[in-house]
Image (spheres, rainbow, N blue to C red):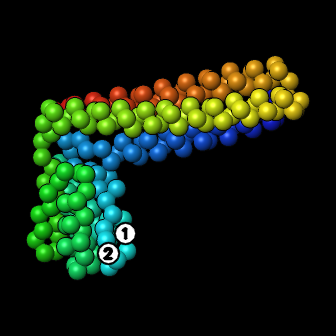
Amino acid sequence: MSDLTDELIDDARGRMDKSVEAIRHEFGSVRTGRASPALLDRINVDYYGAITPLRQLATISAPEARLLTVQPYDKNSIKAIEKAILESDVGLTPNNDGSIIRLQIPELTEERRKQLVKVVHGICEEGRVAVRNIRRDVMHDLRELKGEGEVGSDDEHRAEQALQKLTDEKIAELDGLMRNKEAEILEV
């Protein structure tokens, strides 16, 4: 393959790696039966009129398997944090003692587990679509290079095969992440 096609494939690999990493992070915010500070990653708090990520306003820890604690840096923000948690989609009820918020993680019901598995499948499909879009863009670039006469059709064909192999690897990686997360959710 030529330098141009190698460059395109390397670029595609980097972009696909970022997509897989983003999906891995997104999976971390899906609730399982265990307490994880990552559950609160998507929560934003209205702090004195500014929307601020919860992580910037408090220390979040998991002292027990079914308990999260949120300790605000500023005690005056505790009501705003409590309100943001209640309004979020995590499905947890905050217990506020004036200086710390405790979040008890309840056992997941069978129905809730099935809903979460569907959420995980949706997130994984978003990742697959992102990887395929990257492949489509790079395929388009390869065809343009061939059309401009900068690469031969053999180089283009080899690059397309390498790109397809890379795409298959990344989709398999996403499927593996999805299966692991699904097993984690269904584990009783």
As rendered, which of 171 and 112 lies closer to the eye? 112
Identity of the residue furthest to the right in this view:
149
Quadrant (top left, top right, bottom left, bottom right) of the N terminus? top right
As rendered, which of 151 and 170 lies closer to the eye? 151
Q: Which mark is residue 52?
A: 1
Count of numbered circles on the image: 2
Mark 1 or mark 2, earlier in chain: 2
Circle 2 residues within 10 Å: few <14, some 14–19, many ≥20: some
Residue 126 appears in the figure = yes
Residue under the point 30% across and 33% down:
118
Q: Is residue 127 above or below residue 25?
A: above
In terms of image quadrants, where is residue 99?
A: bottom left
Q: Is residue 7 above or below residue 75?
A: above
In terms of image quadrants, where is residue 112?
A: top left
Residue type at numbered disc 2:
Tyr
Q: Is the Cβ of the residue at disc 1 closer than 8 Å to that at disc 2? A: yes
Residue under the point 62% across and 24% down:
164
Residue type at numbered disc 1:
Thr
Circle 1 residues within 10 Å: few <14, some 14–19, many ≥20: some
Residue 180, horizontal then vertical, whole percent: 34, 31
Residue bearing the label numbered 2: 47
